[in-house]
Image (cartoon, rainbow, N blue to C red):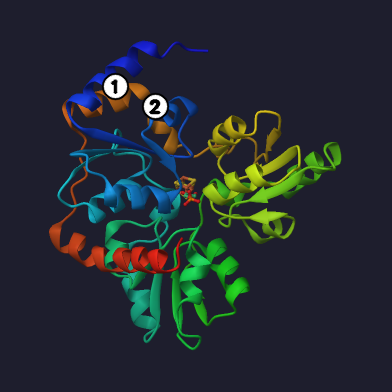
Amino acid sequence: MKDNSDIVRKINDVRKKKNAVILAHYYQTGDIQDIADFTGDSLALSQKAAETNADIILFAGVKFMAETAKILAPGKKVLLPDLMAGCSLADSCNPIDFKKFINDNPGRTVISYVNTTAEIKALSDIICTSSNAVKIVESLPENEKIIFAPDRNLGNFILNKTGRDMIIWKGTCHVHEEFSLEGIIKLKKQYPEAKVIVHPECELPIRLVADFIGSTSALLSFTEKDDSKTYIIATEPGIIHQMKKSNPGKLFLHVPPRDSTCGCEECSFMKLITLEKIYNCLLNEAPEIIIDNDILIRAQKPINRMMEISRRLGL
Ligand code: 13P
Ligand code: SF4
């Protein structure tokens, strides 16, 4: 295993000197999760960003997450160690087409997943994450008509749970749409006792064979409370780092993609972040997340609405 002690010491020195907080998503590599001040799912990371006293937030994650932190804490400097850390799902919904989609379907409340650009958030009424999406939809009056974007799998998952009148944008994530059902069946034959746990961004056939479906933090806490010994995991494999840490005696098996040459076994965007880039980013205070002020102000409203509903429901 690589000795990271030198770079970790340098990161610790600079983050202390600059009063910076490092927030890491569960899809980051284990070495980054281990040095973060806080590791969590999209909702928990947004909540942390909103309440931190630090002067600088360094986001070890992807751009939409860092943008959400900036929108929630506009007075702080928000850094993302590599601006190329995007998201194929966020990219599947562009503002011009989305505006037309909203205009073509008038009279609907626009709920957008947090995996969207700031521009898409600015066009939305409420934001949700995978951990509060169903509850947010259920919190609305039953007859309220909804547009949901951009993930068609999460949208269908919410639709099946709530039965609400929803029109769904047809976006997907390149990691979650690729999991192989055959791969799950093979693993299940080898480990018949294993539980299949799945992120709601996965396609329907994968969700249908799941023992449990949830956000990254919900999947993690399922493995902590459940008494099985083996799990078959259909989400980005970074989360397995935390699962192993909190369940040392258990076995975690990752579902392979349908096409072994697709390069989508992990989130290539998340994996652009490295300890070296984190250090340089803290040192140079760049790259920094800058959002056009008009977009930032308009994106605040739907994010604050999500935070408010989450607080009210104790999520
Ligand atoms: P979570 O909110 O469940 O952590 O998911 C984030 C994500 O990007 C899923 O692909
Ligand atoms: Fe986006 Fe998919 Fe990566 Fe999540 S795993 S950040 S949805 S590309």
Side of 230 where 178 appears, left or right: left
Tag on residue 35?
2
Marks 2 and 1, the one that precedes in the sequence: 1
Q: Secondary structure at mark 2?
A: helix
Front one among 152 and 210: 210
**Above or below, 159 relative to 286:** below
Residue 95 visible, this orientation: no
How far apart in space, not on screen, are marks 2 and 1 (Cα)? 9 Å
| Residue depicted at x 32% and y 56% | 117
Q: Say the numbered circle drawn on residue 74.
A: none
Give the secondary structure at mark 1: helix
Give amino acid for label 1. Answer: Asn
The vertical placement of 251 against 93, above or below, is above
Q: Position of residue 36 (x, y in %)?
A: 38, 32
Residue at point 23%, 28% (across, down): 282
Residue at horizontal 59 percent and vertical 66 percent from the top: 157
Image position of 298 (left or right of 157)? left
Q: Residues within 10 Å of mark 2 (few under 14, many from 20)?
A: some
Task: Where is residue 120? Give x, y as percent.
Answer: 32, 63
Residue 238 x, y percent position in the rendering: 53, 35
Badges 2 and 1: C-beta atoms under 8 Å apart?
yes
Q: Residues within 10 Å of mark 1 (few under 14, many from 20)?
A: some
Image location (x, y in percent) of residue 49: 30, 48
Residue 33 placement: quadrant: top left
Q: Is mark 1 within 8 Å of ligand 1?
A: no
Q: Amino acid at mark 2?
A: Ile
Quarter of the rendering containing residue 106? bottom left
- Asked whether residue 43 appears in the rendered view, the answer is yes
Residue for badge 1: 12
